[in-house]
Amino acid sequence: MLQIKDLTVEVNGKEILRDLTLNIESGEVHVLFGPNGCGKTTLLMTILGYPGYKVKKGCIIFKEIDITHLPTNERVKLGMGMSFQHPPEIRGVKLGDMVKITLGKEKREVDKEVIALARRLNISTDFLSRDVNLGFSGGEVKKSEILQILAQSPEFIMFDEPDSGVDIENIELIGKIISELLDRNKMPSKRDRAGLVITHSGSIMQHLKADRAHVMIDGQMACSGMPYEITKNIMKNGFEKCVESCKN
Amino acid sequence: MNDNTFSDEDIVIEKYTTGKEHKPLKSLDKFPEEYRDDILDAGIEPMGKNRAGSFLQQDDSVIYSNAEDKSLEIMGTADALKKYDWLKDYLWKMVKPDMDKYTADVESEHGQGYFIRSKAGSKVTVPAQACLFITSDNVRQNVHNIVIAEENSELHIIAGCSVSHTVNSALHLGVSEFYVKKGAKITFTMIHNWSKGMEVRPRTAVVVEDDAVFIDNYILMTPVKSLQTYPTAYCVGKNARATFQSIVYATGNTKVDMGARAVLQGNNSRAEILSRAIATDHAKIISRSDIIGKGANAKGHIECTGLLLSDDAEVDSIPELKAMCKDLELSHEAAVGKIAEEEIQYLMARGLSKEEATSLIIRGFLNVDITGLPDVLANDIKKMLDMCLEKVV
């Protein structure tokens, strides 16, 4: 579904990603680990085509189309979506409006659908009428992001720390919904969707049962392997030692 | 009472002639078809549907005035002055003829304008409508409006000022005096639907007595050559409240110097001034707001934000607070800037094109929840705002 080849990316003139290669097949979920500032979010923003992220080298192929230079909305139309870590506040635009936009349908009968989706995430109708992200708590931001993704239902979904700031009760719920969104409750042969997830939470990992994990250091994939093994190694030895043992 | 604080754009008043006479209409369905859209765009319901009464003035002639609801009186100011001897005590009480040359001209060349009054204790939740429109070229429309809500009454007004699409240039000079008596409430929602050759100078003052409420909503979305307005509410009574909310979208070469001022004299009096100003093309907006606190425990808040959509446009935001008593709470927030790129990108990440995203952000910016209105009127105003927005974004 997604092939990234030798990708080098600059942000404000500074090289953040270096010769990065990554392949995600349909039905697969990959998890991205790495210390703060290693370039995880940069990779996601580059895949999504944010203008501040300049591709200096390499390419991004999505569903066999070279999307390296497509604007964000064109990529989204092809079937990708993103749950942001720190989305901006937009005054006067309600969360309910955002959900309607992502549903991408004519206005008729949409209200019911929005409310039904919101109910799955225990989101009240009052919350839907608030300005998007304005004064939301950390947990509310994540729920709002996942609600929008739920409405959009893309084939390839990126989650940038969907768990940070979320309380224990809701982390369970979010884990469950993300797993459903990524077809994890289906038999492996029936899974069509794919995902790339940045997370630090064991709980989300348990729900996801990801196929592959990567450790990113200084803008490169330093080590890849089975999520369970990698997580255990990082917990025990830290990122750098984990990478060293990978090399051996 | 000194309102001569405008950055004055000098208008040669004599260049404009006093207007043509027009015959009164027997009923609203006789209203000329050709102007129907022009007044619709100013929020006026041409058939008077769902309105407690209507007042229509074309150039200098009152062509229709009728109160459906008998708790209200609606008529031309000149007729009202003939009918009520006491009314002269309300005329030029809050706005002085010598304030500037425009008020002086309204005094010497007085034309019409409306008189609207709600009877003591009456509560009419359906709005009355008043329409001042110009259909003759080069006309000077002078009006003097008097609005009185007697004690414990409730009065809602939709005022539409409009100009026919056939008029190239004209001048509108409007003096308005509002009296909100003890325990009364007035909401006044005004849509200005001018055109690029119009010069406009409204001069407005409001008196708010004990436990009374005045809410002013102002919408301007069409171009205008130059407009200058700075209504002042004097909250003289205890618990008096005044709210001004304005939404302005300035295009072309529009020049707008607008604002609102509240003088909090009464104990526990309150004022809120909220404005949203967007300037694009070569438009220039000066957005003023001023709260003066004198009474004990008075509270005032200003929120003015401006959005710039072009490098050739300009928004000056000038909030002012003046405290003249120690037990006061006065505050303001002001922000002027362009649309954040991050917000556009976020909406694009939800599938919108750049243009769609920009338009949604602008609509959101202008999407002010207008408070204090009955539900039906609030819905009506929302529709009017949507209608105005439809044309610009």
Image: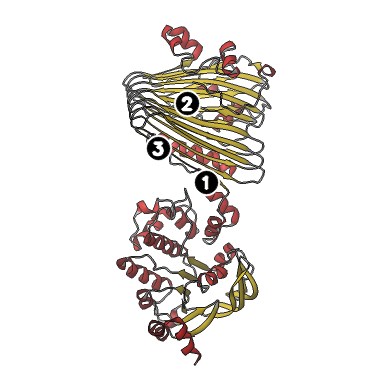
Residue B42 shows up from this direction: no
Residue under mark 2: which chain is it in?
B
Q: Residue at x 47, y 49 (%)?
A: A91
Location of residue A182 in the rendering, given as x and y in whole percent from the top left corner = 43, 73
Q: For the residue labelled by badge 3, is the local secondary structure a helix, a strand or a loop?
A: loop
Location of residue B53 in the rendering, given as x and y in whole percent from the top left corner = 44, 23
Residue under mark 3: which chain is it in?
B
User: Quadrant of the rendered structure where residue B264 is?
Assistant: top left
For mark 1, does the 10 Å Cα neighbourhood hold few (<14), some (14 to 19), or many (20 or more) residues? many
User: Which scheme is used to colour this image of the protein?
Assistant: secondary structure
Residue under mark 1: which chain is it in?
B
Q: For the residue labelled by badge 2, is the local secondary structure a helix, a strand or a loop?
A: strand
Q: Which residue is mark 1?
A: B363
Distance of label 2 from label 3 (alpha carbons): 20 Å
Q: Nearer the viewer, mark 1 or mark 2?
A: 2
Q: Which mark is residue B232?
A: 2
Residue B105 shows up from this direction: yes
Q: Amino acid at mark 3?
A: Thr
Distance of label 1 from label 2 (alpha carbons): 28 Å
Q: Amino acid at mark 1?
A: Arg
Q: Which residue is mark 3?
A: B371
Query: Looking at the figure, which quarter contains the N terminus of chain A?
Result: bottom right
Distance of label 3 from label 1 (alpha carbons): 18 Å
Q: Establish if B180 lies above or below B392.
A: above
Q: Amino acid at mark 2?
A: Thr
The one nearer the camera, B122 or A203, is A203
